[in-house]
């Protein structure tokens, strides 16, 4: 887009890059905020149906479409309270820290081949690293609230997230190993074609490790049955006991943003990203290079695919939340350290051996993706190792 | 000329276009990192210190991203910022009570720390500005943010320096040995930490054991003897069970 602004519209470089960045940031913000709005409504409806009731029905017509909006207005109008003993600065800062961490992770998340805030060579790693910072806001909130409930909740969350990062990292490494790259765009592109190319169906080990990933992802975004940090039956509301109004809603936007993020990550890493189960675009003859408009439509279709998969992941998380009872803290730790971690390690080894013995994968592959040569495996023509990526060009242009 | 184009031309002529944005962001991130580093020292609440430390380290990660070293930047976020998080947890756990909320060093400590810090800063500054190569803008360095060459080097293949004409892996061991040494070292540290942090076995028999050892006096004496004789390797608990 910046190139378009510079070349076609004729904007100077700095302005074009600023406009591009602002547009990307605004779009991502809307994905998080709009997503939270829809998901909160969906959560209420799903919770209602699972508990054999209707959920919201009155606000905004038959299905209570506008319930989230009404909630938002209510939150805006709520009195903003702060406890007497609270550490004012940290108390005010905490929700923004949480939200920023969630937002930053979205920057490196591709929605389709070219629809990405900032394509990064180490995209997976960046997303995991930044997502782990979300707990920082929770700890600050728990400490600054000067409340025992909050502190307990924050400590639980910290212990849980730090522990679950280990198996989560191990699960994420497997698709990275299969694709030979940490670039999220490359990983998804390697799974192009029919659904049999998805890493989920690559071999039995990846199939198992996908479910380990799901478990760890649910735990790392602090959802039931792992929502010890806000266990309302024991800790009132956990780390956000003392929060009200808009600040409280920032925590919730961060939570729903993270849910969407880990689901999208699962879609990209294991389920082909923006490549649908059936390569419709290729079948009807649209592909990269058919033309700019065709490209654009292919990418829009891809984005719809990714958003659909990610939404499906979020809905599954809700289904789990309203079905399973909450675990005790020791059970949470046992699940992580005694089951998830060894299982992930074993599956990682298995996938590695499989890659050596039977690199083609288990399923018959239709429409095998073209990029089978690994990035950086062979020296490039210029003597440099890896092929030049988009970012190198961008950096050079920003510098000039 | 249409009005829109003339506006564009005016915008293009603004002095802001002449700013070297790379340097601007470098200075911005560097100032943030240094400012928050000073704030860490100046603050007297452990949790606020940790917050400032995280911000300072985050700004340093920004510097890495700015330099095109995305892998190092992400590492910085993962290891240092994430590590500080754990530090913060301990800080909260240890200082949530009243007497330790505020930490203030005495005047003498501050003077000493100031001298040591200033000396270190002087050495580093002198070193940084005395290397001729670092003072000139790097020429001919291709910014390649790929992490693959790093990973390949760690397992012994230097893709960044391929020998002329030969296959990639020939005669270039890369960093395999240092990598192995570091990983074994880390493993030792982990095992040691697990050993130190494990649940300690009790020296005194538990209540349930006392209840179980209501036996003839001879058996109790024998039990105690076993416990003493195994004091080096095992414990009373295992001795009692055997």
Image: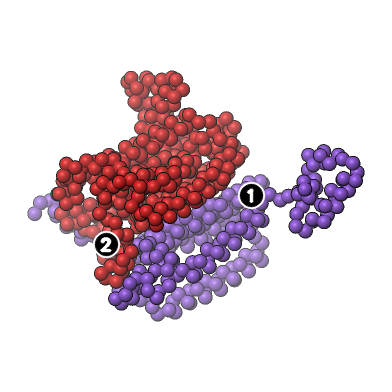
Chain colours: A red, B purple
Instruction: Specify the label residue B95 is tagged with.
Output: 1
Query: Camera-side residue: B26 or A117?
Result: A117
Where's residue A189, x and y in %?
29, 50
Going by the image, does A85 lie left or right of B203? left
Instruction: Specify the label residue A392 is tagged with.
Output: none
B14 over A325 or under it: above or below: below
Q: Chain of mark 2?
A: A
Query: Camera-side residue: B156 or B44?
Result: B156
Where's residue B10, x and y in %?
18, 57
Q: Residue at x 42, y 51 (%)?
A: A351
- How far separated are the C-alphas under marks 1 and 2? 49 Å
Q: Badge 1: few (under 14), some or many (20 or more) residues near its Cα, within 10 Å?
A: some
Query: Camera-side residue: A225 or A360?
Result: A360
Q: Which residue is mark 2?
A: A393
Q: Are marks 1 and 2 on the same chain?
A: no
Going by the image, does A323 lie left or right of A118? right
């Amino acid at each position: 887009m910046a190139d378009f602004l510079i070349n076609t519209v004729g904007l100077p470089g700095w302005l074009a890059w600023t406009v591009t960045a602002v547009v990307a940031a605004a779009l991502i913000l809307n994905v998080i905020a709009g997503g939270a709005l829809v998901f909160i409504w969906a959560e209420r409806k799903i919770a209602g149906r699972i508990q054999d009731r209707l959920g919201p029905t009155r606000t905004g017509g038959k299905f209570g479409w506008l319930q989230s909006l009404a909630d938002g207005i209510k939150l805006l109008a709520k009195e903003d309270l702060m406890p007497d003993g609270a550490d004012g600065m940290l108390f005010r800062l905490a929700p923004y820290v949480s939200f920023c961490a969630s937002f930053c992770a979205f920057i490196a998340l591709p929605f389709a081949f070219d629809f990405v805030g900032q394509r990064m060579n180490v995209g997976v790693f960046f997303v995991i690293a930044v997502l782990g910072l979300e707990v920082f806001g929770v700890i600050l909130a728990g400490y600054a609230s000067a409340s025992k409930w909050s502190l307990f909740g924050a400590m639980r969350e910290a212990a849980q997230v730090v522990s679950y990062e280990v198996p989560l990292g191990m699960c994420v490494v497997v698709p990275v190993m299969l694709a030979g790259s940490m670039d999220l765009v490359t990983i998804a592109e390697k799974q192009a074609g029919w659904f049999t190319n998805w890493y989920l169906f690559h071999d039995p080990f990846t199939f198992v490790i996908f479910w380990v990933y799901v478990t760890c992802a649910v735990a790392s975004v602090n959802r039931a049955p792992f929502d010890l940090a806000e266990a309302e039956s024991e800790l009132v509301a956990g780390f956000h006991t003392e929060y009200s109004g808009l600040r409280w809603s920032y925590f919730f936007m961060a939570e729903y943003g993270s849910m969407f993020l880990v689901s999208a990550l699962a879609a990209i890493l294991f389920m082909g990203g923006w490549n649908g189960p059936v390569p419709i675009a290729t079948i009807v003859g649209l592909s990269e290079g058919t033309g700019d408009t065709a490209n654009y439509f292919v990418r829009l279709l891809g984005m719809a695919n990714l958003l659909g998969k990610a939404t499906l992941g979020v809905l599954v998380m809700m289904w789990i939340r309203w079905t399973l009872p909450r675990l005790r803290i020791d059970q949470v730790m046992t699940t992580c350290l005694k089951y998830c971690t060894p299982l992930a390690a074993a599956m990682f080894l298995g996938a590695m051996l499989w890659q050596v013995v039977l690199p083609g994968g288990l399923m018959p592959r239709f429409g095998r993706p073209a990029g089978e040569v690994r990035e950086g495996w062979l020296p490039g023509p210029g003597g440099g190792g890896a092929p030049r990526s988009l970012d190198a060009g961008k950096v050079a242009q920003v510098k000039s | 000329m249409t009005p829109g184009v003339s506006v564009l031309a005016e915008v293009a002529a603004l002095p802001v276009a002449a700013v070297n944005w790379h340097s601007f962001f470098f200075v911005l991130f560097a100032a943030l990192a240094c400012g928050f580093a000073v704030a860490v020292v100046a603050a007297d609440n452990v949790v606020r210190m940790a917050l400032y430390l995280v911000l300072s380290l985050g700004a340093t990660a920004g510097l890495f991203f700015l330099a095109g070293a995305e892998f190092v930047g992400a590492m910085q976020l993962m290891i240092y910022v994430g590590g500080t998080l754990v530090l913060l947890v301990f800080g909260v756990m240890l200082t949530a009570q009243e007497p330790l909320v505020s930490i203030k060093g005495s005047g003498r400590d501050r003077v000493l720390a100031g001298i040591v810090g200033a000396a270190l800063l002087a050495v580093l500054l002198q070193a940084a500005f005395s290397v001729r190569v670092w003072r000139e803008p790097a020429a001919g360095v291709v910014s390649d943010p790929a992490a693959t060459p790093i990973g390949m080097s760690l397992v012994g293949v230097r893709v960044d320096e391929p020998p002329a004409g030969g296959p990639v892996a020939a005669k270039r061991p890369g960093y395999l040995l240092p990598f192995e040494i570091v990983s074994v070292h880390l493993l030792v540290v982990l095992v040691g930490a697990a050993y130190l942090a494990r649940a300690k076995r009790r020296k005194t028999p538990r209540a349930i054991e006392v209840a179980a050892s209501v036996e003839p006096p001879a058996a109790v004496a024998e039990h105690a003897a076993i416990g003493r004789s195994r004091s080096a390797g095992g414990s009373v608990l295992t001795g009692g069970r055997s």
